[in-house]
């Protein structure tokens, strides 16, 4: 008859083999650290890809609009920048969330060891803060000439070249 069915005192079994809580936490921290590095790399790659995709996008839109410069070229540029900005912000947000989780695990490990642990804290960020942090200034710098070009086009300072008759 099992212990759960009789009303006798419950016996506890101490597990003597297997991983310790510290080794499990270390393994978890290592995995989270690898995920943080991956997210950080993806932020950089997203920025590189955005800069790479921006020029061909404008060229393709102009090509499909009979080689005329129009507002569509500028709108396409802003859309490309916006999509990459959002993707980068999501990656940054999850990178910060992972770092905060790592700190919780470090605190748990330090408490088990009765050690003083007072590292600088990683600030939790909201999705809005993730979208408007210092590293996102790259997208503002990309958007500035596109918006300036659009404004100059709308004011008539920049004109569409006359299409070549074929």
Image (cartoon, rainbow, N blue to C red):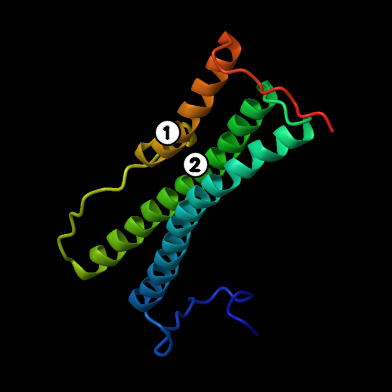
Q: Quadrant of residue 25?
A: bottom left
Who is closer to the viewer here, 80 or 162?
Answer: 162
**Location of residue 152 in the rendering, given as x and y in whole percent from the top left corner:** 53, 16
N-terminal label among 1 and 2: 2
**Residue extending farthest right:** 166
Rendered position, 33 above or below 70:
below
> Which residue is more in the foreground, 70 or 75?
70
Residue tagged by mark 2?
89
Residue 141's tag is 1
Q: Which residue reaches farthest left?
A: 116
Image coordinates for residue 83, horizontal then vertical, percent: 60, 38
Few, some or many C-alpha atoms within 10 Å of disc 1 (few <14, some 14-19, many ≥20)? few
Mark 2, secondary structure of its residue = helix
* Marks 1 & 2, CB-CB < 8 Å contact: no
Q: Residue at x 57, y 18 (%)?
A: 158
Q: Is residue 161 left or right of residue 94?
A: right
Residue at the image point whose x is 37% and y is 51% from the top = 100
User: Extreme bottom residue here?
Assistant: 17
Between 11 and 59, the residue placed more toward the observer is 59
Residue 142 appears at what percent x and percent y? Answer: 47, 35
Look at the numbered disc 1 and give the secondary structure of its residue. helix
Disc ID at residue 156: none
């Amino acid at each position: 008859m099992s212990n759960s069915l009789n009303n006798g005192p419950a016996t506890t079994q101490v597990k003597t083999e297997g991983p310790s809580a510290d080794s499990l936490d270390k393994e978890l921290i290592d995995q989270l650290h690898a995920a943080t590095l991956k997210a950080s790399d993806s932020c950089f790659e997203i920025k590189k890809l955005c800069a790479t995709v921006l020029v061909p996008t404008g060229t393709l839109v102009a090509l499909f609009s009979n080689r005329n410069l129009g507002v569509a070229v500028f709108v396409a540029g802003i859309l490309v920048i916006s999509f990459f900005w959002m993707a980068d912000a999501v990656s940054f947000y999850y990178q910060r969330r992972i770092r905060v989780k790592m700190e919780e695990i470090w605190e748990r490990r330090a408490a088990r060891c009765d050690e003083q642990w007072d590292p600088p804290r990683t600030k939790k960020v909201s999705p809005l803060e993730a979208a408007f942090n210092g590293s996102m200034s790259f997208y503002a710098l990309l958007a500035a000439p596109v918006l300036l070009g659009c404004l100059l086009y709308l004011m008539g300072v920049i004109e569409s070249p006359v299409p070549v008759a074929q």
